[in-house]
Amino acid sequence: VCYAEALVVIGKTYYIPALLEIVERDRPFYQQSGGGVTVSGGEPTLQYPFLIDFLKAAKQADLHTVMETCGSCAWSKMEKLLPFLDVIYFDLKIVDAAAHKQLTGSSNRLILANARKLVDLAADVVFRVPLVPGMTATAENISDLVDLLNEFEQHRVHLLPYHNMGESKLERIDSTLEPLNLQTFSEQEIEEIKSTFEAAGIVVSIGGG
C-alpha cells in the first residue's frame, strides 16, 4: 500500500472460476461469431500453471481457445498445452540468430525449434510477424521469413505493422525506456512487404486476426 498514492496497481488477480464466469458472459457472441477466448499478454506461458488450468476449464466449458505466444517456452510445456488449444498465434520476429540476439538479447533457437515441432505435429498454428522499421522489417529478414515459411510449408502469415500507441504509457509506468520514435509505415510500404510474401504463394493478413 502506498499511502501517498504515488503508486497505482495496474492489473487484477483472478481465480479460474471467476475468470471463466466473465468469459462465459460473452458466450452468445461466441456462438454467433464463431469466436472464443484468447489468452495473450505479455507472454501467457510465463504464468504456465494458471494458463494450463484455465485452458482446461475453458475446453471443459466447450469454448474455442486461442493462445498468442512469442514461442520462447520449454517444449515440454508447449506440448502439454496443445490438447487445450484450437489455434496458436505464433510470433516470428527475426530469423538470423546473431541479429535476433542483438535486438532481443536472447537466442531464437528455442523459438524456431518450437515452431518446427508445431508444424511437424500439424498443429493449427498461424505465424505472425511484427513489422518494426529497421529491425524486423528489413529486406534481409523479410526474405529469411519467406524462406522459413516455405520450408515449413506454411502458406499464410499475419503481418503486424509497428505503431507507437504504447509509447504514451512509458511515463505512466515510470519506465526507464526511451521512446523509439520510429516512423510508422505508409500504406505503400506495407503493400510492398505484403507483395513479397504473396509472390512466394503466402496468403497475407494485415493486423491480428
Image (cartoon, helix red, strand yellow):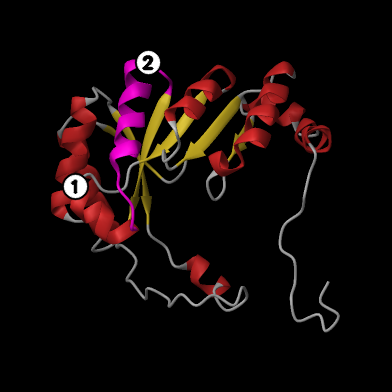
As drawn, is 100 to the left or to the right of 40?
left
Residue on which the image places disc 1:
96
Is residue 117 covered in magenta?
yes
- Please tell me which residue lies in front, 64 or 15: 15
Q: CA distance from mark 1 to mark 2?
A: 25 Å
State yes or no: residue 12 in magenta. no
Residue tagged 2: 122
SS at mark 1 in the image? loop
Q: Residues within 10 Å of mark 1 (few under 14, many from 20)?
A: some
Quadrant the N terminus occupies: bottom right
Taking depth in this image into account, of 184 and 3 the one nearest to the observer is 3
Magenta segment, which residues?
Answer: 105-124
N-term mark: 1 or 2: 1
Identify which amino acid the numbered label 2 is placed on: Ala
Kind of residue sitting beneath label 1:
Asp
Question: Which of labels 1 and 2 is toward the front?
Answer: 1
